[in-house]
Amino acid sequence: MASSKNTREIVTSIVLILIGVGVGSIINDIPGITFNTEIDLATCIAILGLVATIFIMPFVVERKLNQQDNINKVVLIDIDSIYSDVLKLKQIYVELTPRTSISQKKYVEIIALFKTISSGILALNTELEKRQKLENFKNDVYDNSYTPTKESCTETLVIKKKLDEKTILDANESLNGLCSSLRTYRYEAYS
Amino acid sequence: MSKTVVVRVSDFAEIPGARYIKDGDNSAEEFFLKVLKKIADQTLLESSFDNLLIDLDNTRGYPSSFISELSKLCSINYKKAKKVKQRLSIKSDEDPGLEERFWSGFKQKYS
């Protein structure tokens, strides 16, 4: 696929050069216009530089764009992974009622998910803090959303004890907030 | 010659509990009283040079109540120790945010 594209480009270039030579030899002497065939060294270097730029620039720009595109894809994958862990937490809190005691299994699931989410957000921040429009990721998502969410979800979390209705509602609400701040950054990273 | 004493929460419990002993097993209060206090008294109060490192890694995670109680107890007991902020350190490579949470709790004033 790639080699046929290259062959086509080479053939096109040769055809264009031949057309140029042909047109040049047909219109050899245009009346009223004379060409100076002597060029100095500076002009020669400038022409060579121009030709080199024309051939090299597309490769450099394309490579840079591809690289940026790949980094964006990784950022989106990371945000999606954090988001899916937050959804798992949400599912746990949606299923909790003031009548259900927290089992050790649920307790471990909750604290382990918070640990994964926290390290995910902070790892992602090292990439995003370098970018315009995304540099406030830690402040918006970690400090203002993750930390209060963890607090409202785990401050009164105790194995074999029940959570009251207000705590469950607050936990759900702050998890929704964390989801939306992650979604906001997902769109920002995509655009 | 100063030495650094390392206390690992993971040696105390794989699953850290909540805030107080009355909350159940492996609470921050239990960790402080049974494990940390004796070592921290020797390292930070009885000595003026030794360092103490609390290693929070290799557990399943922490509820916020454990970290805030641990930082509160450390603050109440050791805030006045000589050069405490240089001699007391927290290691949390798995969840770097915990270190920040600990110090923000440590700086608070408790009555």
Image (cartoon, coloured by chain):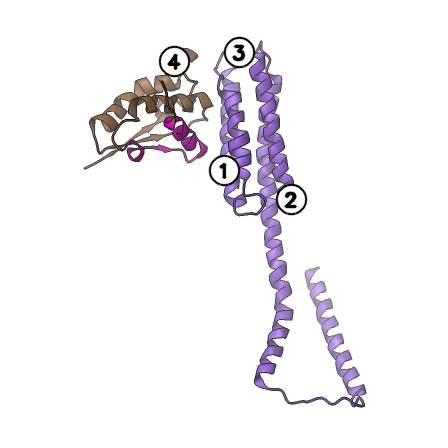
1 and 4 marks on the same chain? no
* Badge nearest the viewer, 3 or 2: 2
Residue range corresponding to the magenta coloring: B84-107
Report the front residue among A136 and B92: A136
Q: Secondary structure at mark 1?
A: helix
Which amino acid is tagged 1? Leu
Q: Secondary structure at mark 2?
A: helix
3 and 2 marks on the same chain? yes
Residue lying at 52% horizontally and 26% vertically, measured from the top left: A148
Chain A shade: purple
- Residue behind mark 3: A162
Marks 1 & 4, CB-CB < 8 Å contact: no
- Crowd rating for badge 1 (residues with CA inside 10 Å; few <14, some 14–19, many 20+): some
Q: Is residue A139 above or below residue A49?
A: above
- Residue behind mark 2: A190
Quadrant in which the N terminus of chain B appears: top left
Res. A168 image quadrant: top right
3 and 4 marks on the same chain? no
Which amino acid is tagged 2? Tyr
Q: Secondary structure at mark 3?
A: loop
Which amino acid is tagged 3? Lys
Residue A153 locus on image (x, y percent): 53, 21
- Residue behind mark 4: B21
How far apart are the alpha carbons under marks 3 and 4? 17 Å
